[in-house]
Image (spheres, rainbow, N blue to C red):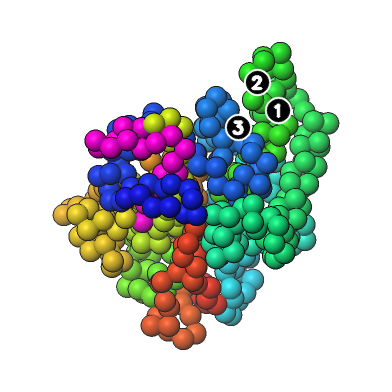
Amino acid sequence: MTLHLGWQRTVVLVGYEAVKEALVDQADDFTGRGPLPFLLKATRGYGLGISNGERWRQLRRFTLSTLRDFGMGRKGMEEWIQEESQHLRGRIDSFKAAPFDPTFQFSLTVSNVICCMVFGERFSYEDKQFLQLLNIISEMLQFGSSPLGQMYNVFPWLMERLPGRQHYFFTRIEEVRDFIETKIHEHKDTLDPSSPRDYIDCFLVRSEQEKNNPTNEFHHDNLVSTVLNLFLAGTETTSSTIRYAISVLIKYPDIQEKMQQEIDRVVGKGRCPKMEDRKSLPFTDAVIHEVQRFLDIVPFSLPHYALTDISFRGYTIPKDTVIIPLLHSVLKDEKQWATPWTFNPQHFLDHDGNLKKNPAFMPFAAGKRACVGEALARMELFIFMVSLLQRFTFSCTDGPDSINLVPEYSSFANLPRRYKVIATPR
């Protein structure tokens, strides 16, 4: 359907069939990214998330291959996640089964994985500067999902001229940019091109190799904004999903117990879970998939854009149209899911209890603009969840019925409600 946001013509694709046809079958036509004013201002138009054309192609190819490299060889991503899961368990142990709000604990943990990959270091859970950055990232997502943030996206020229909190949020983003700039300067001073330690090192090496190339996209502005993209996209989405998963397990203690029995049987209590355990934990994997489907973290996806006129299903989508592939309508499509509005891990299990794939499972979107961090996020969700359930049983003071799975904010992102939880050591 076509609607107008302000005077911006917008086409919304609804349902699995339409979204798949656009993003997968006609992937080349739909690679354009909409100029989302909020992200445009935060990244100054640079970086992977908001770019198009040659810039997007070069940065995406580089980022995917670098993430892949860090997944294998060197100190791989899996090891970083396993190590961080131990820090998280130690942190939760320190609450000694008293109620606590897990929001920040999960943000710290997930963000540290991104930090290992991007900066080559993790930060202490007491590091004040790190806590400040996470606070800003959390504020950003809430701003993007608030009426004020949506107003900014529809009427940026007006919101720039009106007084209001939107100006405060953009000064906060500058603090994150300053932090990233400082880290890049530190990397330049200690760079060994023969042995890159992390994403920034790899980017700096590539930048040097490409310096005489007139179409070089490996420059400082793109590095700062791509790191900002990875930070913003990779912290709050995954940590919110883990937080939502814990709420689901408190609400459905029988599901939690069944997962623990499967984990005890396959992994035991002594060793750290690893990715190859996944094929032996079909029920646990199905629950994690269903958490992602049910939460539906970015219901609108990020907007796409018609860079030229597009022929689609007998219609012409004119150049400069914003295109919203409504992921919400795919993850809740009544033709694709037996009980779309109910939390039901059976959506991902066959009759023999083995994991079954569903093509309508698109929490990371699909096609050429699908989330670059998908493999990392899947790894984090699996290892963190298994590691937590191996060690703790989760509950809350007011009992399972007090948990409301309807998100607290539902707009640009679906953000789960905050609860104090009790983690009882097993």
Judged by depth in the image, the label closer to the viewer, 3 or 2, is: 2
Residue 344 horizontal/vertical position (percent) = 28, 64
Q: Indicate which disc, 3 or 1, sits on the residue closer to the N terminus.
A: 3
Q: Is residue 123 left or right of residue 419?
A: right
Q: Do tag 3 and tag 1 residues touch (Cβ < 8 Å)?
A: no
313 falls in the magenta region: yes
Residue at screen point 55% across, 47% down: 36
> Dot 3 corresponds to which residue?
74
Residue 128: quadrant of the picture: bottom right
Residue 257 horizontal/vertical position (percent) = 35, 70
Chain part drawn in magenta? 310-328
Residue at screen point 58% across, 55% down: 155
> Dot 2 corresponds to which residue?
216
Secondary structure at badge 1 equals: loop
Please tell me which residue lies in front, 18 or 119: 18
> Dot 1 corresponds to which residue?
219
Residue 293: quadrant of the picture: bottom left
Mark 3 Cα-neighbour bin, 10 Å: few <14, some 14–19, many ≥20: few
Q: Is residue 179 left or right of residue 115?
A: right
Q: Indicate which disc, 3 or 2, sits on the residue closer to the N terminus.
A: 3
Mark 1 Cα-neighbour bin, 10 Å: few <14, some 14–19, many ≥20: some
Residue 277 horizontal/vertical position (percent) = 39, 47
Identified by mark 1, the residue type is His
- For the view shown, which residue lies furthest in the left direction? 351
Residue 101: quadrant of the picture: bottom right
Identified by mark 3, the residue type is Arg
Mark 2 Cα-neighbour bin, 10 Å: few <14, some 14–19, many ≥20: some
Question: Label 1 to label 2, Cα distance in Å?
Answer: 7 Å
